[in-house]
Image (cartoon, helix red, strand yellow):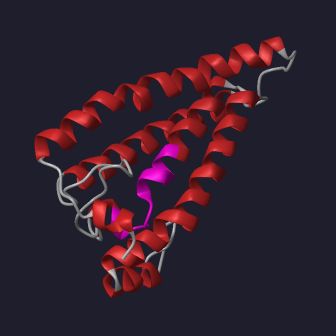
Amino acid sequence: MSRYVRWARTERGERTRVTVTALLSPVFLVLLPLAVALGGRRIDRCLGRPPLPVGAAGRVIGGAASTFGFGLGLWSVRTQLGRGRGTPLPLMPTQALLISGPFVHCRNPMTLGTILAYGGLAVAARTATGLAVVMALAVSLLAYLKLLEEPELAERFGEAYLVYRRRTPFLVPRLTGRR
């Protein structure tokens, strides 16, 4: 058993989990969205890039994707804090294997929500730089999940995780078929 897995099995109290999550939430709910939308637009202007050519319908779709993404992300965090007895942070991982709530549809609903939220926001704000930053962060996050988190979950939760991994899509939920 790796040292991280032994450490990850240490359960933190509910007050600690909620406090840490609440203290970090402004970063993910305010600062990063502002950086993507306003920072992206400012960098686009400095680089002489025109706004993304998405019309009103594209801006509405971007806004809807962002709203859905934030909702999915918040549902995932709530499930991690409650049923999972952990946080979204690798420093305080869940103590229970989550296979209910948003985790029924895909193994990484918070990541899907994050990509939709920030990507939709970049489209709604019409910023190519913001969208490029979101895509670069998405690739990094997906690599982390595949290369580090999945092996750790397999070690920590064993056969139960392996069965869940075989049955549940990594990121994009199935629209039809068996779950």
- Give the camera-side residue of 83 and 92: 92
Image check: 32 left or right of 161? right
Residues shaded magenta: 103-114
Question: Which residue is at the front of the view, 148 or 24?
Answer: 148
Where 127 sits versus 64, above or below?
above
Figure check: 176 above or below 103: below
49 vs 142: above or below? above
The part of the image, by quadrant, that contains residue 116 is: top right
Quarter of the figure with the C terminus: bottom left
Q: Report x, y in % for residue 144.
A: 56, 58
Q: Which residue corresponds to the image point at 48% horizontal and 73% vertical from the top-left?
A: 151
Residue at x 57%, y 31% (from the top left corner): 121
Q: In this view, does 37 lie above or below 100?
A: above
Tell me what residue is drawn at x 26 percent, y 54 percent: 80
Residue at the farthest right position: 48
Q: Can residue 179 be seen at all in this image of the molecule?
A: no
Left or right: 173 with respect to 81?
right
Q: Percent x, y for residue 86?
A: 24, 53
> Toward the viewer: 34 or 20?
20
> Residue 9 appears in which quarter of the rendering?
bottom left
